[in-house]
Amino acid sequence: MALLKPTVVIDNGTGYTKMGYAGNAEPSYIIPSTIAVSGGNDSSTVRSRQGIDDLDFYIGKEALDHASTHQVNYPIAQGIIQDWDNMEKLWQRCIFQHMRCEPEEHYMLLTEPPLNPPENREATAEIMFETFNVPGLYIAVQAVLALNTSTKPEKYFMKYSDLHPRTKQPWEIDVGYERFLAPEIFFNPEIFSTDFTTPLPNVVDEAILKCPIDTRRGLYRNIVLSGGSTMFKDFGRRLQRDIKRLADDRQAANLALHSKFHQAHAEALEVNVLSHRMQRFAVWFGGSMVASTPDFYRVCHTKAQYEEEGPRIARHNPVFNATM
């Protein structure tokens, strides 16, 4: 295989898009996952005929700045791509304006949420191979990439330990109850909305209970945090405490029920929530790790495979361990 330039890693989230090159510790660019398109004024028909409307759009922060003159659109909802035309435009600007690369020279790693419809993978492959003519594509599940980041993070922390955030001018602000109210929504969501009232610890606990019984103890010991919303101080400790209470209360109730008939004993349940320094960009960094391994090119779908089999090749993407 010809020597290729570093893989481009793009993590498209509902709120933000993170992008950069494989092998880096942090994404090069982080922008809102939004696009502002022409609003359709009186001259829109003429301008469209001239092909100007296709170029009159903004993404990220620029899109929000032009909200008064353009229609702001969020192509991704609940992690799933809903507007493919605008998503293609978003990718276009990400690749050419921010990354400033020729897509024909770089493999692409994109992310997807769990249970992403296979049709979405096909549409993604069609855009990447036909519009951008990429030589190879890998679509990775975000949760898997986050787990890769949490497995052996310390060897990467040593390599990138010289990264420190800096600001040109220090600022002092007084933070009151808002500091505690914002993250409290995760644990008492009813203070914000009556549509969703299940606390995060209950969601995690219920998800584990739906797994095979012989895997549950291992899952309770390996709850991994990922994403910027988990960066609140002591978020992991609070989540671990609340999940532990739920599990212990249920275990005590079961023991009390069985003790009526015979003597019952149970080993104490260990709950461990894993926090690490890379969890803010865990998904993107996991993609950076994956795309830096020799096995990455072996499992990628290539342009030749796409031309031979069509978009259906993207329905399945092998999962492999990037930390080995």
Image: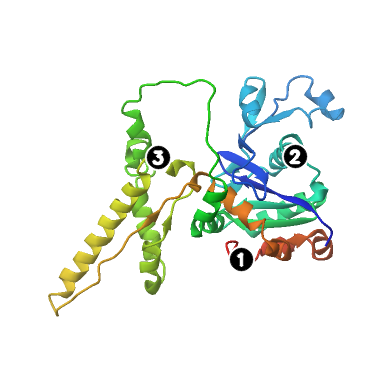
Q: Earlier in the sequence, mark 1 or mark 3?
A: 3
Label 3 secondary element: loop
Residue 193 appears anywhere in the view: no
Instruction: Please give the residue where the numbered disc 1 appears in the rendered image.
Output: 320
Q: Quadrant of residue 315?
A: bottom right
- Mark 1–mark 3 Cα distance, whole angstroms, equals 31 Å
Q: Amino acid at mark 2?
A: Gln
Instruction: Please give the residue where the numbered disc 3 appears in the rendered image.
Output: 232
Q: Identify which residue, 158 or 115, lies in the foreground.
A: 158
Identify the mark at residue 92; answer none if there is no mark: 2
Describe residue 191's horizontal placement relative to residue 60 as left or right: left
> Where residue 243 sits: x, y (%)?
31, 55
Q: Amino acid at mark 3?
A: Phe
Describe residue 164's horizontal placement relative to residue 19 as left or right: left
Residue most toward the left? 260
Q: Identify which residue, 17 or 55, lies in the foreground.
A: 17
Foreground label between 1 and 2: 1
Instruction: Answer few, some or many: residues within 10 Å of disc 2's Cα (few below 14, many 20 plus, some between 14 and 19).
Output: some
Q: Amino acid at mark 1?
A: Phe
Quadrant (top left, top right, bottom left, bottom right) of the N terminus: bottom right
Q: Identify which residue, 317 or 42, lies in the foreground.
A: 317
> Where residue 10 sits: x, y (%)?
65, 46
Q: Earlier in the sequence, mark 1 or mark 2?
A: 2
Instruction: Answer few, some or many: residues within 10 Å of disc 1's Cα (few below 14, many 20 plus, some between 14 and 19).
Output: few
